[in-house]
Amino acid sequence: MSETISGEVHGSLKARRITGDVIAYIFLIVMSIIWLVPVVWVLAESFNKNTAAFTTTFFPTEYTFNNYVLLFTDTNVLNFGAMFLRTLIIAIVVCVISVFFVLSVAYCMSRLRFKMRRPFMNFALILGMFPGIMAVVAIYFILKAMGLTESSLGTMIGLIVVYSAGSGAGFYVMKGFMDTIPFSLDEAATLDGCTKWQVFTKVILPVTKPMVVYQAITAFLGPWLDFILARAICRTQENYTVALGLWQMLQKEYISRFYARFAAGAICVSIPIAILVIITQRLYQSSMGGAVKG
């Protein structure tokens, strides 16, 4: 009798588990479709032969590669190629500077002890609570007074300075990771004759590669996708970034001609991000395979 009851209970629990798994998989499949449909639509629209903004069908019926060709060759109205290259240079330079700043500040806050260390961290935390958009107007007038809002080169330098200047204040995540690294590694390296710089580059940096990957991706995406700050600083089309170029394509005077090109531009914008993720993912996997903490 007891074996029969136990078998029924076990069968009931198994049926509930299977039902729960089926519901979970159905939910995940539905959410995946909802997430993928816009991506597939943008990709299909980028090859749409009909450049009109509104069509009778959801997916295009005729396809062409001409949208990508015109996107980079037709410079009469919007020079998307120049915008793309300008933004790529800004994003790469900002990525390198930001990673160095964040690593340096995080190392000092985590491994060194000095006067005003705690007040500095509290001050940086308080400043981080204020949205960056509050300073957009002041930043614009400062850059304008310095002559960094007129020419294309000046605007690039201004954007690089603005994006990089405050990056060191975002050290808290990196510092939290460095705090988990035992101080015994620093002490052992110091006993072996290493300087602070050598401890940082030879001991701490190899262990923090996963966080370096994270910081590199976020530092690159900031200027690459930013619209608000770029819109305030870049006043003419000759200084536009790629986000402003895509925004311009959707204005009423351009949308009838550039709607399909806008989709092609959106696909092109995603390519550097995908390449960066692939490269950094390999670095992340190799660092996790060889990192030793404890």
Image: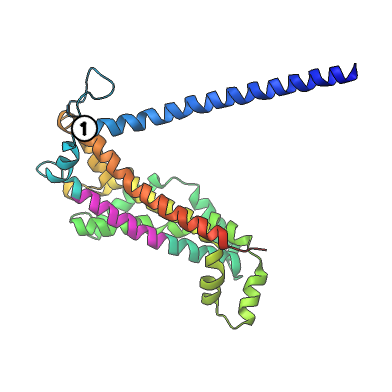
Residue 97 in magenta stretch = yes
Tell me which residue sits at (50%, 56%) in the image: 284
Task: Name the residue nearer the viewer: 139 or 74.
Answer: 74
Residue 188: % across, % down: 65, 76
Q: Residue at x 28, y 31 (%)?
A: 44
User: Is 21 on the left-hand or right-hand side of 243?
Assistant: right
Against 72, is 250 above or below? above
Q: How does the figure colour the protein chain or chains?
A: rainbow
Above or below, 112 relative to 230: below
Decide which of 200, 158 is in the foreground and name it: 200
Check the image and name the residue furthest to the bottom.
193
- Residue annotated with mark 1: 260
Residue 89 quadrant? bottom left
The residue at the point 44 percent across, 63 percent down is 101
Q: How many marks?
A: 1
Disc 1: CA contacts within 10 A as few (<14), some (14-19) or many (>=20): many
Query: Is 86 in front, or is 135?
Result: 86
The magenta stretch spans residue 258? no
Q: Main secondary structure of the magenta part?
A: helix
Above or below 248: residue 121? below
Residue 33: % across, % down: 43, 27
Badge 1 amino acid: Ala
Front-most of residues 255 and 169 = 255
Q: Quadrant of the rendered structure where residue 49 is?
A: top left
Quadrant location, the N terminus: top right
Q: Tell me the element at label 1.
A: helix
The magenta segment = 82-98
Left or right: 150, with 108 as reference point = left
**Residue 164 horizontal/vertical position (percent):** 38, 58
Decide if residue 236 is in sight here.
no
Rendered-image quadrant of the C terminus: bottom right
| Residue positioned most to the left | 76
